[in-house]
Image (tube, grey):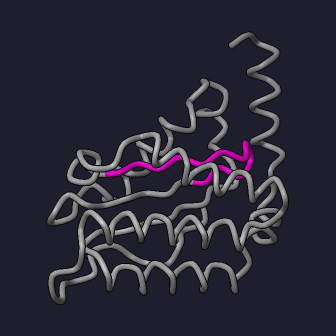
Amino acid sequence: MDIGQRIRRAWRHLSSRRGEAERAFPETTLGAIAQAITDGEQTHRGEVRLIVEKSLPFEEAWHGVSNRERALALFADYGVWDTEENCGVLIYINLAEHKVDIVADRGIDRRIDSATWQAVCRTMTDGFRQGRFHEATLDAVEQVNGLLRQHFPASGSRANELPDRPLVL
């Protein structure tokens, strides 16, 4: 990445405002996402975590940290990897770059290929381009729930290991 690209990228992240995240993901949307995650987790053994980040920290944007690298770091930082059956899924949304990444724990990653996850990400990014943050995110959460239902169906009651409420950074 040349210096001009670094400056433009860093500026895009620095100039992102919290209000933009709140408009894209208002309280009603966050509540609906949390409910969709809660409802879905009743039908499968997976644990779904959604993190929305308005922008990368300046140093990470400047040093060219990719969306995938940031998603992997948050996957670790928020313990999505630390579920009993290794079936945590992180949906990471970077609003400044309008990018989405999904990181699945090793138990899930063995059964669901990256092309399938990319299709779920496209559901969101296509909807985001149209300003449909609420609907696109709920559609993607339902797709994730459907994949987990197919590969990790519920087998009785279990503890909820990760918060269902989306985290906005």
Q: x, y percentage for residue 26?
A: 74, 78
| Above/below status of 116 relative to 87 | above
* Pick the front one: 27 or 113: 113
* Pick the front one: 63 or 80: 80
Bounds of the magenta segment? 93-104
Residue projecting furthest to the top? 2
- In this image, 77 relative to 53: left or right? left
Determine the residue positioned at 45% across, 64% down: 144
Verify whether residue 99 appears in magenta. Answer: yes
- In this image, 146 relative to 96: left or right? left
Determine the residue positioned at 84% across, 58% down: 130
Determine the residue positioned at 62% across, 43% down: 57
Image quarter where the C terminus lies is: bottom right
Q: x, y percentage for residue 104?
A: 35, 51
Q: Main secondary structure of the magenta part?
A: strand
Determine the residue positioned at 74% across, 66% down: 133
Q: x, y percentage for residue 32?
A: 60, 84
| Above/below status of 42 relative to 142 | below
| Above/below status of 128 relative to 118 | below
| Above/below status of 41 relative to 70 | below
Residue 151 sits in which quadrant?
bottom left
- In this image, 50 relative to 88: left or right? right
Verify whether residue 144 appears in magenta. Answer: no
Image quarter where the N terminus lies is: top right
Residue 66 sits in which quadrant?
top right
